[in-house]
Amino acid sequence: MRLKSLSFRLLAAEGLALTVFFALVAIILEQGLRDSAEQALQERLQVQSYSLLSSAEINNSGQLKMPDYLPEPRFINPGSGLYGFIQQKQGPLLWRSPSALGLDVITPPPLNVGQSLFSFDAHGRYVLHYEVIWQNVSGVEHEYTFTVAEDAQFVRNQIEHLQETLRVWLLLIGIVLVTIQFALLRWSLKPLRSIATDLEAIEQGKKTLLDGTYPSELKGLVGNLNAFISMERAHLERYRNNLADLAHSLKTPLAILRGCAESFSIHGETVKEQISRMDEIVEYQLHRAAAKGQQKTIKTVDLPAVTNKIIASLNKVYLDKGITIAAAIPEACRVYCEEGDLYEIVGNLLDNACKWCQHNVKISISLNVRNNRRNFAVQIQIEDDGPGIPLGKFNEILKRGVRADENIHGHGIGVTVVYELVTLLGGKLEGGKSTALGGMRWNVYLP
């Protein structure tokens, strides 16, 4: 157990509290035992004084006599620890028990008749004085003080034995309670250890989220952590995708520049145009990477103008292939879309069509179309005479990094970018077989 861990702190705090508690309990119980033992001793000495009183006799001359044998044998045995004295009030000592031979006489304090006094003297003895008045047969009264004393060692031995027993039991109870508290702490803090273990598994890539069974008190924390993990993972994925999109977007301008490198003087204007286009792509992708979520645009873009620019660029890229791009587009058609998004959508689909076609590509734009009981502002249809996409492969190519033919050079993200952008704009992307050219047909519906 680590010294700075929560378990150690709680266990140390509870151990300290239990130690203080049991120390106070021991002090209170020991004091109670001492008082109880002294009370019991006082009552026992009172009984012994009554025993001496019952054994004493006064003759006709007024002299007090004690028998040779007493009910309590300890009064007879020297050094037994129980001592008895009888004195006449303000008079000499009349009797001492054989057990008190050689001891100094215990002088009683002034007492009233019938009064008793229990005390602890300077010699370490508990003493009980009892004042009585005695009348003989002649009617003469005599006042006596009966004193009974017992060594404190007997009481001390009893108290020490009780204290030892009490401390042993308190220590055992304390150990048992600390053990139980440790087990309870381990059990109570198990959910926190589970969260720590799951977080470590997430760091190692073995888990994606905190999916364990946690107490209701920790569900808010777990939910916030999962939301934070998901958000960070989504941000990272978005940054990766945007970097991939950036690389893919720069592919076409770079191809054009590569074709213009051999005759820079002839294609100088084209080079400048493509450099400007590359700068716009970088700005656009950086803007997407910084975006927090879906944003609605109020800008309109001229779709035919963007399409004509893309067609002109692709004619230069695929000049050696001898492609014919037929365009059936209106003179003016403005759509609510970012210009960069429109370049990505039309450019990726047209580039794929040029890459896969034999010789012919067709693009047409229709206005105010209806699809699946929903009205769209515009439909962009792109067709080619290539082999098309095999059945069952359409859903696969919408995944990032998947290509229809691994033998063809590419990154496998063009159609994915189109699908993400169209979905984000609230549109729809459909793919199928072209009836006019026999190859692939893409339909893009934009609101």
Image (tube, grey):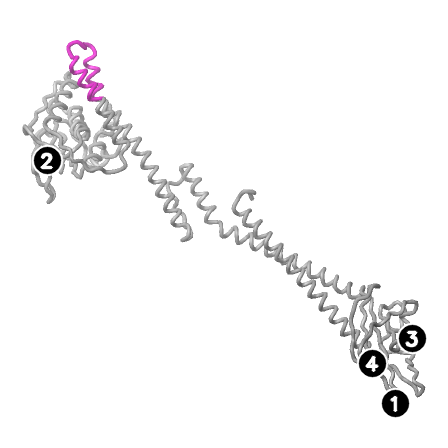
The answer, for residue 393, to whether it is visible in the render is no
Specify the segment rendered in magenta. 252-278
Q: Earlier in the sequence, mark 4 or mark 1?
A: 4
Horizontal arrangement in the rendering, residue 153 relative to residue 286 (left or right) = right
Q: Earlier in the sequence, mark 1 or mark 3?
A: 3
How many numbered marks, from 0 up? 4
Label 1 Cα neighbours within 10 Å, binned few <14 / some 14-19 / many ≥20 = few
The mark found on residue 139 in the picture is: 1
Residue topped by disc 4: 132
CA separation in Å, label 1 and label 3:
22 Å
Mark 3 in CB contact with mark 2 (< 8 angstroms): no
Type of amino acid at the residue the image marks with label 1: Gly
Residue topped by disc 3: 92
CA separation in Å, label 1 and label 2:
141 Å
Q: Earlier in the sequence, mark 3 or mark 2?
A: 3
Label 4 Cα neighbours within 10 Å, binned few <14 / some 14-19 / many ≥20 = some
Q: Magenta span has 67?
A: no
Quarter residue 303 falls in? top left
CA separation in Å, label 4 and label 3:
16 Å
Q: Secondary structure at mark 2?
A: strand
Question: From what the image shows, is residue 239 above or below residue 183?
Answer: above
Main SS of residues in magenta: helix
Q: Earlier in the sequence, mark 4 or mark 2?
A: 4
Q: Position of residue 205 (x, y in %)?
A: 40, 37
Question: From what the image shows, is residue 378 above or below residue 183?
Answer: above
The mark found on residue 378 in the picture is: 2
Q: Magenta span has 271?
A: yes
Question: From what the image shows, is residue 145 above or below residue 214?
Answer: below
Question: Which residue sits at x=21%, y=16%?
Answer: 257
